[in-house]
Structures are given as structure tokens and as C-alpha cells.
Image (tube, grey):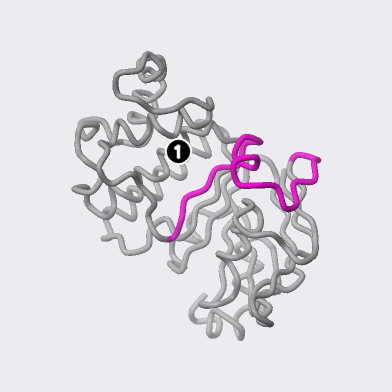
Amino acid sequence: MLIVEELSKSFDGFRAVNKANLEVGQGEIIAVIGPNGAGKTTLFNLITGVVKPDGGRVIFKGEDITGALPHEVCRRGISRSFQVVNLFQKLTVFENIQVSILAREKRTWNLFASSSKLVRQETEEILKRAGLKGKEGVVAALLSHGDRKVLEIAMALGGNPHFLILDEPTAGMAQDEGERCIDLIRTLSREMGLTIVFCEHDMEMVFGIADRIMVMVRGTTVAQDCCDAIRCNRMVQEAYLGGSNHA
């Protein structure tokens, strides 16, 4: 479904991503791991058009989308959540999701417009799927950290994606919130058939949910394989996991 070939990006002479490669099959859950500064977020930014690559290609469902603008990437079926939560703080949970749906439909959000009523049913469905029923009237700024992260995922669903990219979805969450987020990711994969790529520092989560893992070190792909093979990969252990006892 997604092929990243030799993707590279430099900032002021620093090579953030260095000929990275990634392959993702339809319906897979793929984890991208690596130490801080490995280039994971920059890789996601390159795939989603936030920044343009210096070299390499991004192929999505057989089409070259290298360098496409973020809204073009979104309309092709790729949605994204960010490491730092990105919400409309003064809008309610319900309104945040409405905005994401209306953006997909190229409409302007207006509380009194008929377009807001047209997407009400879809908004309700996303609220239910994300486990946010009962909180639809809460202003986003007043949500707990965990609910804010879940709302951002719910907003990504408003784009009706086929492919979902999550940047550290459980970062900063309490254990129960993190478990809830993991359950949501599993549900989205199983019930909606979404293909999901995420980066995460919680290795218990990574090995518990991923079908395969891609490892980045200094901007380069050093391995991409099933979880068991990654556990046993000596290069990965030395570069990132810190030895077999940490795998």
C-alpha cells in the first residue's frame, strides 16, 4: 500500500533522513522505532507532505505522491496525528470532529450552517468508535491529556482515511489511558480495515501491537521485519534496544 524508497531530507547540512526505506502492506500495523533524533517524525512529515524531500520517492497505492501538499495527501486517503496534540482548543469535541469531516468535503465550518447538520450522523459514528460518547459537549481545552490524544485520532478519522499515521499516540499518557489508546488502534485496524503506521518509545506497546517493525538510526533504515526477528537482530539491539535483555 505504501512504499518509501531512498527518502532523504537535510536541514542546514544535517541529514535528518538518509535514504530511508519502508514498505507497508494493506491492513498492517507497522511500528517505526529508533532513538531520539533518528528521523521518525521527519519521515512522517515527508510522507504526508509537511516537508519536501531532497531525494527518493513515496508511492501510495501505486501512485507517486512525492512532494504532494498535505491536503492533497489527505484527500488521497492518508490521515495523520501529531506528537504535539493539534486541536481547535475553543471548540467542543463534537465540533472538532465536524471540522475534520467538513474539511474533507471542502466545506467551511459554521455552527448555524446546514452543512454542520449534514455531517452530524458521521460525527456521531466517529464519537462512538473513538469512545468519546458522553464527552461531545466538552471544550477541547478542558479534556484530559489522554482524551485530547484520542480526539486527535478521531479527527484523523474524519478524513475517511485508508491509511493512518500516528506520531507517539500514547506519549504522556497514564497506563489506563495508554491501554485505552492501544485498544482503539487495534479496533481501527480490525473493524475498519485501516492500515496504520506509528512511532512509539513504549517497547511493550510496540511489540504487543505491531505486525512488523521498522528501525531507524541516524535517519537510515537499519531493519524492517517481524517482531521476533527484530528482537533477535544484533544490530538493532546494539543500536537501539540496548542488548537482548531489553528486547
Q: Nearer the viewer, residue 75 or 232?
A: 75
Percent coordinates x, y for residue 196 in the rendering: 57, 47
Is the residue marked by circle 1 packed among few (<14), some (14-19), or many (20+) residues within 10 Å?
A: some
Q: Secondary structure at mark 1?
A: helix
Percent coordinates x, y for residue 209 in the rendering: 50, 53
Q: Is residue 119 magenta?
A: no
Q: Residue at x 59, y 40 (%)?
A: 74
Q: Is residue 230 left or right of residue 192?
A: right
Q: Residue at x 52, y 48 (%)?
A: 80
Q: Is residue 71 magenta?
A: yes
Q: Could you say which quadrant of the image residue 7 lies in?
A: bottom right
Percent coordinates x, y for residue 174 in the rendering: 26, 60
Which quarter of the rendering shows the N terminus? top right
Q: Residue at x 42, y 44 (%)?
A: 153
Residue occupied by mark 1: 187
Query: Looking at the picture, which amino acid does disc 1 mark?
Result: Thr
Instruction: Report the span colored magenta.
Output: 61-83
Percent coordinates x, y for residue 227 in the rendering: 60, 62
Q: Is residue 75 left or right of residue 122?
A: right
